[in-house]
Image (cartoon, rainbow, N blue to C red):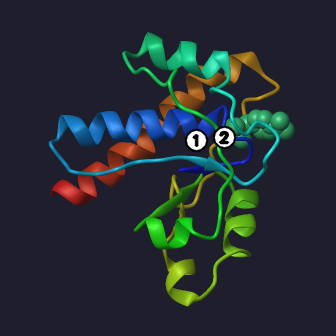
Amino acid sequence: MVCLGNICRSPLAEGIMQHMADEQDLDWQIDSAGTGGWHVGEGPDKRSTRTAHGRGIDISKQVCRQFSKADFEEFDHIFVMDKMNLSDVLAMAPNEEAAKKVKLLLGDKEVPDPYYDNNQFEPVFDLIEHGCKAIINRATS
Ligand code: 4NP
């Protein structure tokens, strides 16, 4: 799960996806990263932590890291939140096979960056949850 800062959206996506996979007894390892490196080593934004906590998901132990080329080998699927993340991640893909792993979490829509708007965290949670549910449904049906 990849966004710009790895403190707002992708930590939520990691927490939600891991929670849903665990509920379904799927042996999936979910991780998240940011294309930017400003917050490396920090925990998630408090607004994301609070929003997740309110929905029964603990993301407080996550630590921000920057997306790297090694992630193309480490992971089978790479979901990005918006089109800027998509082009930034695709620009790092070493080959066509790696590029094929990268998709927008919502298929064709974007998960907007809530960083500058406190009121966006709840709707962003809902959008991410919707995207994760679709992934689970595809994998389990
Ligand atoms: P995120 O939000 O990409 O959802 O983690 C942002 C967090 C921080 C910054 C940008 C976006 N920033 O520029 O520091």
Q: Residue at x 20, y 34 (%)?
A: 23
Quadrant hosting ligand 1 = top right
Name the image quarter holding the C terminus: bottom left
Callout 2 touching callout 1 (CB < 8 Å): yes
Q: Is residue 128 left or right of residue 91?
A: left
The span from disc 2 to disc 1 (Cα, nearest Å) is 5 Å
| Whether residue 54 is situated above or below residue 116 in the rendered picture | above
The image's mark for residue 10 is 1
Provide the residue designation for mark 2: 6
- Label 2 beta carbon less than 8 Å to ligand 1: yes
Kind of residue at disc 1 = Ser
Kind of residue at disc 2 = Asn
Which residue is at the front of the view, 59 or 103? Answer: 59
Which residue is at the front of the view, 27 or 113? Answer: 27
Q: Quick one: label 2, few (<14), some, or many (20+) residues within 10 Å? A: many
Q: Residue at x 21, y 51 (%)?
A: 27
Q: Quick one: label 1, few (<14), some, or many (20+) residues within 10 Å? A: many
The image's mark for residue 121 is none
Mark 1 residue element: helix
Mark 2 residue element: loop
| Whether residue 94 is situated above or below residue 20 in the rendered picture | below
**x and y percentages locating residue 97 in the rendered image:** 50, 86
| Whether residue 48 is situated above or below residue 87 in the rendered picture | above
**x and y percentages locating residue 94 in the rendered image:** 63, 84
Q: Is residue 41 left or right of residue 48?
A: right
**x and y percentages locating residue 52 in the rendered image:** 48, 20
Which picture quadrant has residue 120?
top right
- Label 1 beta carbon less than 8 Å to ligand 1: yes
**x and y percentages locating residue 4 in the rendered image:** 73, 47
Q: Is residue 89 left or right of residue 28?
A: right
